[in-house]
Image (spheres, rainbow, N blue to C red):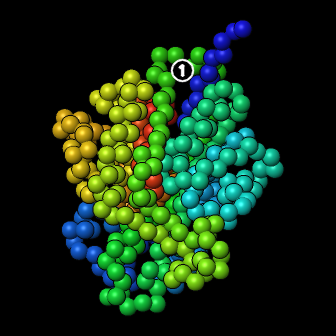
Amino acid sequence: MSQTTDRHVSVLATGAHLPGDPIDNATLARLAGPLPDDVLEGIQVRRRHWIADPETGEHRTSTSRMATAAARQALRRAGVGADEVDLIVMSTASPDQPLPVAATRVQEQLGLDSCAVIEVRAGCVGAVQAFDIARRLLADGTHRTALVIGAESVSPLLVPFYLGQDPDRVRMRDRLTVHTFGDGAGAAVLRAGEEGSAAGRPRPAFATRSMGGARKPGMLIAGGGTDAPLAEQQRRKRLMDIRIDIPGTATFGPRVFVDGIHDLLRRSGLELADIDACVLPEGNAEYFSSEYGTAGLSAEDQRTLGKTIVENLADVGATGSAAVPLALDAGWTGGRIRPDDTVLLLAIEASRYLYAGLTLTWEVPAPTP
């Protein structure tokens, strides 16, 4: 029996979509109460975009429509027609409805009668997991052209923290949650080429793990599930709620990152010095990066890593499944990620302290404006 050779998989283009106008910290301070300057500096979010109108809570778009907008931009930049897509892999923790999955809404909005669809229900790590699922299905010849999408709508959970309340009475931990998160979608077009076309390039490596099996969740979104009868859920203060273990995420999150990057480098055979761009959406946030040493990253490795981090947290906030694809798009379109760069995608998720990482070689120049 002859050995099957994987086909080379290329990223042809990325796309992004952010809903509405940017919402600055002054607007949220007026609505939900201010945060101390040192806390704002620590989270480093200056603006974000929401599907919910911050003044009224009215929804102006949806997760699937954002995903479709990002996908269309990626397809346009790639010069690929929607009818050429035979696989959509999407990640979100905030679908339009539990069923049908949001990826089929994207399929519908792109006008695709028939298409393979896979949806990953996750937060930050999901888009990287989706990326690798698509890459493998293209590499083994199952499909040829894929859309990978990460999309998230967190703002519907945030507005109830303050809407109709005196801003001075909003709890400080709730203000921190409101200021931290944003909505958005990012997408990438992947295509399989011929066998052997990746000669001389390192093979992609993938690593993922949940490190929180024995810990309480770092983030919990309660409501709308089957943890309790619906009538009981409706008696809660909020039908859906987002709860964050702030001390836990600040102290254990960096350890998850350090374990993740060491795992991925070990699997890939690369050193940190070999990485040209590390797409790590929260990599420069002070509350996170200040704990790298305690988590086991040497001072030398911290300096090396600091030169490679690609992120856009200040402009979009923490965006869950959209975080890595949004940062990847910003890095590529801004010229930070260039042809022949060795790129490391790394996502950290607080829910059960997960990481997911993928290495790849970038091939396409930045799009013309």
Image height check: is 183 above or below 12?
A: below
189 to the left or right of 217: right
Determine which residue is flagged by label 1.
198
6 to the left or right of 311: right
Q: Residues within 10 Å of mark 1 (few under 14, many from 20)?
A: some
Instruction: In this rendered view, identify the residue nearer to me: 161 or 22.
Output: 161
Image height check: is 136 above or below 186?
A: above
Residue in the picture at 63% in, 27% down: 139
Task: Identify the residue at the far right of this view.
Answer: 113
Image height check: is 328 above or below 92?
A: above
Residue in the picture at 42% in, 58% down: 216
Residue in the picture at 45% in, 33% down: 359
Expressed as whole percent of the image width and height from the top left, the position of residue 326 reads: 47, 52
Expressed as whole percent of the image width and height from the top left, the position of residue 44 reads: 29, 62
Task: Report the amino acid beneath label 1.
Answer: Ala
- Name the image quarter holding residue 148: top right
Residue 16 in view (yes/no): no
Task: Identify the residue at the far left of this view.
Answer: 299
Instruction: In this rendered view, identify the residue nearer to me: 207 or 6.
Output: 207
- How many dots with numbers? 1
Instruction: In this rendered view, identify the residue nearer to me: 302 or 332.
Output: 302
Secondary structure category for the residue under label 1 = loop
- Name the image quarter holding residue 346: top left
Expressed as whole percent of the image width and height from the top left, the position of residue 124 reads: 47, 52
Residue in the picture at 51% in, 83% down: 237
Image height check: is 214 above or below 357?
A: below
Residue 131 in view (yes/no): yes
Point out the image quarter for the N terminus: top right
